[in-house]
Image (cartoon, helix red, strand yellow):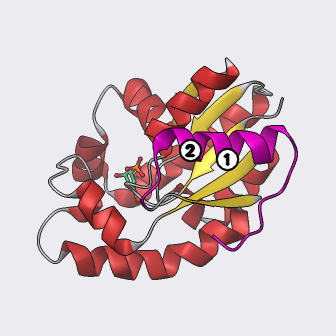
Amino acid sequence: MRPIILIGYMGAGKTTVGRLLAEQLSYSFLDTDGMIEAQERRSIRTIFEMDGEERFRDMETALLEKLLEENLEDVVLSVGGGLPVRDKNRELLKKLGTVVYLSAQKETIVERVAGSEDRPLLQGQHMSEKVEQMLEIRDPLYRQAAFAVVKTDGRAVQQIAQEIEQSVVMGHEIAKNG
Ligand code: S3P
C-alpha cells in the first residue's frame, strides 16, 4: 500500500496517532522531524537556532525528494507542521502517498502544546495569538494537500486512528469538511 501521510498543525496528534496506526496496520512509522534530527545529529531547536527556519525548510524538501525515490510502501509518515506550507512540498506529498490532515481547533492546540520547549516557533509570549495566526494561514494549505480531513478535538487516539484506517485503507473518502 501507498504510504499514509499525516499532516497538521503542531499538537494535532500526528506522531501519537501515526504510531498507533502503524502498529495496527503492521506498517513502519517514520517522521520527518526525527529523520532530520538523526541525519543532522542535532535537535530541531538547535537547527532553527544555528541555521534558521529557511534552511530547515530546505532540509524538509530534500528529505521528501529522497523518500520519493525510495518508493516507500506500508509506511505511516508523520510530517512537521510547517512542511506542507511550501507549494513544492505539497506537490511532493501528494506524489508520495495518501495525505490525511489531522485538524484541531486553536484551543485544543494551545492546550496540547503548552509548556513544550522543543517547538521553536511557539516560544515566548502570546502563544494563543501565534497559533491563531499560523492556523489561519496554514489551514487552507493543509486542506489543499489532503485527501481526507479528520477532526481530532476531544477524540481518543484510537478513534482517530480507526477513522483513518477505515477511510484510507478501506478506500472510503471522508468528506473534506473537518
Ligand atoms: C514546525 C513543527 C514541528 C517542527 C518544527 C516546525 C512548524 O513539528 O517541524 O518545530 O512549523 O509547525 P511538529 O508539527 O511535529 O511539532
Q: Is 159 rendered above or below residue 152?
A: above
Q: Which one is in front, 86 or 144?
A: 144
Q: Residue at x 50, y 80 (%)?
A: 137
What is the count of numbered marks? 2
Q: Residue furthest top?
A: 26
Q: Position of residue 80 (x, y in %)?
A: 47, 49
Q: Where's the N terminus, which quadrant?
A: top right
Question: Residue 171, image x and y in percent?
Answer: 88, 45
Amino acid at dot 2 = Gln
Q: Is residue 96 visible?
A: no
Pick whichever, 144 or 106, lies toward us: 106
Q: Which residue is mark 1?
A: 163
Asked if the magenta segment contains residue 64, the reply would be: no
- Magenta stretch? 154-178
Residue at point 45%, 61% (across, down):
9
> Which three-letter amino acid code belongs to the residue tagged 1?
Glu
> Mark 1: which secondary structure?
helix
Q: Is residue 171 visible?
A: yes
Q: Residue at x 57, y 26 (%)?
A: 29
